Image (tube, rainbow, N blue to C red):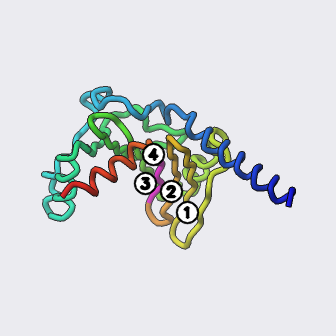
Amino acid sequence: MKKLFLIVVLVGFYISALAQNVDKTTNINAIELGVEKSVFGDDLYLITGDEPAYKEAPSLQYALKRKIMAGIRDASYLGNDYRKFGNFEATNITMQFYNDRLFKVQWTFRNRNSLKEIYDYLVDFYADKLGAGKEGVFDDFRQVEWEGHKNYVQVFMDNESDVTLVFEDVKVSKKVQKVLANSK
């Protein structure tokens, strides 16, 4: 019984330590969560829903316009800063803002010839910083997640098309989900 209790306590400390590591992360690739959207200046393209892709998909356009009315803005980062990770460069950087403050960043890498190398690089780099993450391997994708009380980091690889790195404020994301659930 004492051994079981000791194991439970040690596992609890281990999980708490992992959460603290990811929660101590103040930025990824020099991007900090919580900054105002104005920090990115002219390098930010705010998605309006009037772009051709949204006009061709009315349900997506409606969902995006609903988010905008709720104070949630999706944006594409058009600049060259923040793209380089070691020898790899992100193809796209998308950002989400709530009440003009950044709460989620997503880097997408679309170099099909190097997907595994990019994935391994990012996983190894963040495992060194954040500790061991929760890994999932499936038929067509794999991922590693680090979730704390404050921050969430994920490296995701679709075996066919891309690798994605996500950095997100957990509390604001939950608030945004509630706001969206209450908006009609």
Residues under labels 2 and 3: Cα distance?
12 Å
Which percent across, then down, holds residue 44?
27, 35
- Say if the magenta span includes residue 96: no
Tell me what residue is drawn at x 52 percent, y 39 percent: 85
Residues under labels 1 and 3: Cα distance?
15 Å
Q: Earlier in the sequence, mark 2 or mark 3?
A: 3
Badge number at residue 170: 4
Secondary element under disc 2, as helix, strand or loop, is strand
Q: Which quadrant of the figure contains the C terminus? A: bottom left
Secondary element under disc 4, as helix, strand or loop, is helix
Looking at the rendered image, the disc whose residue lies closer to the viewer, 4 or 1, is 4
Q: Which of marks 4 and 2 is nearer the N terminus?
A: 2
Residues under labels 4 and 1: Cα distance?
21 Å
Q: What stretch is highlighted in magenta?
A: 162-168
Q: Are marks 2 and 1 in contact (CB under 8 Å)?
A: yes
Quickly name the residue at label 2: 156
Quickly name the residue at label 1: 142
